[in-house]
Image (spheres, rainbow, N blue to C red):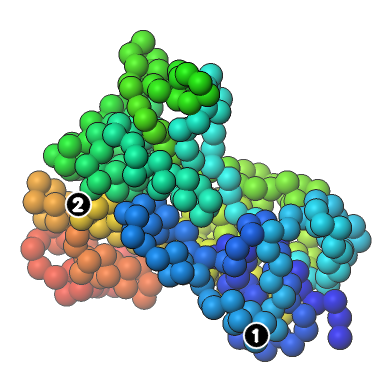
Amino acid sequence: MGRGTVVVGGGQAGVQVALELRRRGEREGITVVGEEPRAPYQRPPLSKEFLAGDYDVGRLAFRKPEYYAEAGIDLLTGERVVDTGDGVLVTDRGRELPYDRLALATGAAPRRLAVPGAGLGGVHHLRDLTDAFGLREELARARRVVVVGGGFVGLEVAAAARAQGKEVTVVEAADRLLGRSVAPVVSEFYRRAHTRRGTVVRLSASVTGFDGEYGRMTGVLLDDGSRLPADLVLVGVGAVPRTDLAERLALEVDGGIVVDACSRTSRPGVVAAGDCTVRPHPRTGDGRIRLESVPNALAQANAAAATLLGQEEADTSVPWFWSHQGDLTLQIAGLSTGYDHCVVRGAPDEERFSVLYYRRGELLAVDAVNRPADYMAVRRALTVGAHIPADAAGAEVPLKTLFCQRTAV
């Protein structure tokens, strides 16, 4: 028996690597070490259902605590890897973890604003359960909430706060919401939809600081000189991959731990998966992209486990993602980056529509708002290599009836 596998990171990707190793018949030791003091859990509900106040935290767990022992997985919680040696990791408790194979699933940390007052009480970030508990407790007492950042997490929290009757303002530095992820028509839809529900949306507005008294924030300062009174602020301006350990291991890092389609890093015997990585485009194999989603974490983790066992299986699955913002459900399949044309199906004003993205006539992706059939049809088409012609996609007929052979590009 060798020294087995150590997985650093107790999130979705890390746990999946361990589970997939066992599923594929790995018999040697597997250790998962995570910094958080609790067993691994789901994160997507933290910005949605959890904030409602009546969500049972037990529902977040990936598995029952006894499952890991029964599966022969040593789960170490509340420990952080602080040093590396030749085939061994050392935690902040002085524990040595020797390994033959190593998987890094270190995740990402919330990006913080480097402005005066950013450390005041009442300024929150949301990445883990501790953050969520603090946010939920203060949200229950708050009257005026400011969300800094018009991305998915920010809009999900804004929707949850409005559902509790709070006065909510979303401040976004760009000229539209979700600007890095969706077409302008979808951005404008979400601006109008949140506004209809009572949220104030301020675009092209940057935060220059927070003021307060007695150590607690009382207002948000903007670059136009205005001030937004606030009892609570959620800063949701993206995440930064955690690459410190990878750098100590001399792995290639470029905006994330660089991996290939099989989750291999630049060092043999070391794989990486999840939010800490940058990877080739899953459909074309080109470039380096970073995907923050549960489906990507799972797909990369499965590829990582296969690689560690010498059963290399490249991940070429279709990326998909979802966002629940109150009664608005957005489902995305594919990657729209580089699109040159899009087709709208349905009526955005009716809050049930989809947008299909194309490049040189080739179907790339779909954004579907409260329109799951369109989402499923495009995801299926991309998976099997079928095509949906742009000139037919706007018709009010089921997309699944429009499949044809992929157009040559």
- Residue at x-position 54% and y-position 78%: 64
- Could you give the CA–CA distance between mark 2 and mark 1, rounded to whole angstroms? 48 Å
- Residue at x-position 37% and y-position 30%: 231
Amino acid on which disc 1 is placed:
Ala
Does dot 2 land on a helix, a strand or a loop? strand
**Residue 197 position (above or below residue 119):** below
**Residue 80 position (above or below residue 111):** below
66, 267: nearer the viewer: 66
What residue is disc 1 on? 71
Quarter of the view holding residue 269: bottom right
The percent position of residue 83, horizontal first and vertical second, equals: 84, 52
In the image, is 275 to the left or to the right of 94? left
Where, quadrant-wise, is the C terminus in this rendering?
A: bottom left
**Residue 408 position (above or below residue 275):** below
- Residue at x-position 33% and y-position 36%: 142
Quarter of the view holding residue 157: top left
44, 323: nearer the viewer: 44
Outermost right residue: 86
Q: Nearer the viewer, mark 2 or mark 1?
A: 1
The percent position of residue 55, horizontal first and vertical second, equals: 36, 62
The mark found on residue 343 in the picture is 2
